[in-house]
């Protein structure tokens, strides 16, 4: 069984704990080091309990605490191949593995999906223990068939639901930033995520974690209700057939399995 805990999720920093009975990995480490350690301590873990840190891409909200973490603990780091040199320059750790295809950490088999994002390279990841499949995909601006196929085998997905279109278009961001977010290489809106869910909810899916919400251009209530409409359309009961959880920027303390 795979457990997933979104420790921090949003534009100020992202970090997700993926666990089996034998393996603990962090997906990104972009929030403040002290708060990250506090949340791990709450979950009964120390730095030495983390077998690896897997990086999605090089933006600060995904790697911000990496220097501080590796200065105190030589945890193995897995980085997309095209940004491995950049990541290496920002760590105190020489144990950096370039991700260029499928790989294994402990009892987790991990596959990758190439995201549409304005980064040098950005990957989503699917984790399998041979029985359960869990995928994490954020920081992508396009819903394509390959993404649908990547998510279909999963019982649990952590998927971006970054913004509400009306809130973004009428909000305070400058025009250029709005266009970046709305582009095919920006972030998924609630509506795009709903479009994606519409194509996979009749499969194996049991848990939906909506992630990377904008604090300025979205709300938990709007993101949740947009996803809920998809379940209702398919006659699926939330909380019974499929669970929806909206990840928080600062504190979650909810493990999904």
Image: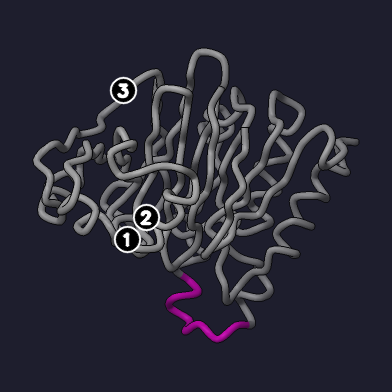
Q: Is residue 188 magenta?
A: no
Q: Nearer the viewer, mark 1 or mark 2?
A: 2
Circles 1 and 2, Cβ within 8 Å, touching? The answer is yes
Q: CA distance from mark 3 to mark 2?
A: 27 Å
The percent coordinates of residue 93 (x first, y second) are 12, 45
Q: CA distance from mark 1 to mark 2?
A: 6 Å
Circles 1 and 3, Cβ within 8 Å, touching? The answer is no
Magenta residue span? 171-179
**Residue labelled with disc 1:** 33
The percent coordinates of residue 101 (x first, y second) are 30, 25
Quadrant of residue 157 in the image?
top right
Q: Which mark sits nearer the N-terminus, 1 or 3? A: 1
Dot 3 falls on a residue whose secondary structure is: strand
Q: Residue at x 77, y 36 (%)?
A: 242
**Residue labelled with disc 3:** 103
Q: Residue 37, which numbered label?
A: 2
Q: Residues within 10 Å of mark 2 (few under 14, many from 20)?
A: some
Q: Nearer the viewer, mark 1 or mark 3?
A: 1
């Amino acid at each position: 069984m795979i457990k997933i805990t979104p420790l921090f999720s949003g534009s100020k920093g992202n970090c997700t704990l993926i666990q089996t009975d034998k393996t603990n990995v962090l997906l990104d480490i972009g929030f403040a080091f002290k708060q990250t350690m506090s949340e791990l301590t709450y979950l009964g873990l120390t730095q030495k309990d983390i077998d690896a840190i897997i990086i999605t891409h090089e933006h600060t909200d995904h790697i911000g605490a990496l220097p501080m973490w590796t200065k105190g603990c030589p945890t193995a780091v897995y980085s997309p191949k095209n940004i491995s040199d950049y990541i290496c320059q920002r760590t105190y750790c020489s144990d950096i593995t370039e991700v260029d295809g499928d790989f294994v950490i402990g009892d987790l088999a991990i596959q990758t999906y190439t995201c549409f994002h304005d980064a040098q390279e950005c990957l989503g990841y699917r984790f399998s223990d041979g029985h359960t499949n869990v995928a994490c995909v954020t920081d992508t601006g396009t819903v394509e068939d390959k993404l649908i196929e990547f998510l279909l085998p999963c019982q649990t997905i952590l998927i971006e639901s970054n913004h509400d279109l009306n809130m973004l278009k009428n909000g305070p961001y400058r025009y250029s930033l709005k266009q970046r977010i709305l582009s095919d290489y920006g972030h998924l809106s609630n509506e795009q995520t709903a479009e994606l869910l519409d194509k996979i909810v009749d499969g194996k899916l049991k848990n939906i974690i909506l992630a990377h919400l904008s604090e300025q251009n979205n709300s938990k209530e709007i993101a949740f209700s947009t996803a809920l409409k998809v379940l209702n359309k398919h006659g699926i009961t939330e909380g019974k057939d499929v669970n929806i959880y909206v990840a928080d920027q600062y504190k979650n303390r909810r493990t999904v399995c």
